[in-house]
Image (cartoon, rainbow, N blue to C red):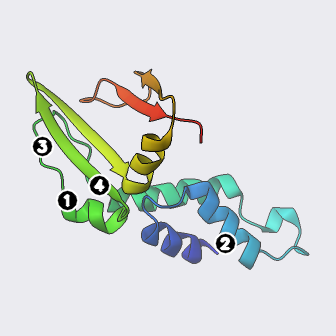
Amino acid sequence: MKTEVKQNARQNIFTCSAPRIVEEVMSKSADVNAPPASRPKPANLTRMANRVRLTKRPKDPKDLDFELDQQFLEDQIPNFKTLDVYASGQRHLLVYSEHQLELLSKAKTWYMDSTFHVVKKPWTQLLSIHAFI
């Protein structure tokens, strides 16, 4: 079971959450008749999956003066596009899909949300745009 979780974690660095990977593997591989104490704990498998995924991800940037690895992004999130914008000495990184733009173009009202606490340095703010469809 651990080997399968590790394999799935390597294949799904950004496309599937670690708890989801563990849930899928356990639903296929776990012996439901086995006593609970004999099965691995989902939390431990999730931590293991996250450690495996961490080794496959690029290192976090220390400052805003870095180059985006476009090939990595295209391989890992093929349906998303990125736009790197420099304006007034500030850097803005946009991540979007054509489908999202299409939905936003049809929406009557857009809702914007600024979040400051979930982003790591060197970033200072996450701005997301939402719409009801």
Q: Nearer the viewer, residue 10 or 84?
A: 84
Viewer-side label of 4, 3: 4
In this view, the mark in front (4 or 2): 4
Is residue 24 depicted above or below 95 in this figure? below
Disc 1 target residue: 70
User: Where's residue 104, x and y in %?
Assistant: 45, 41
Amino acid type assigned to the residue bearing label 4 in the image: Lys
Q: Is residue 79 above or below residue 114?
A: below
Q: Identify the residue at horizontal 31%, vertical 68% (top origin).
A: 75
Residue at the disc numbered 2 = 25
Q: Residues within 10 Å of mark 2 (few under 14, many from 20)?
A: some
Mark earlier in primary sequence (4, 1): 1
Check if mark 4's residue and mark 2's residue have beta carbons within 8 Å: no
Q: Which residue is mark 3?
A: 66
Q: For the residue marked with disc 2, what is the amino acid? A: Val
Q: Earlier in the sequence, mark 4 or mark 3?
A: 3
Q: Position of residue 60 (x, y in %)?
A: 26, 44
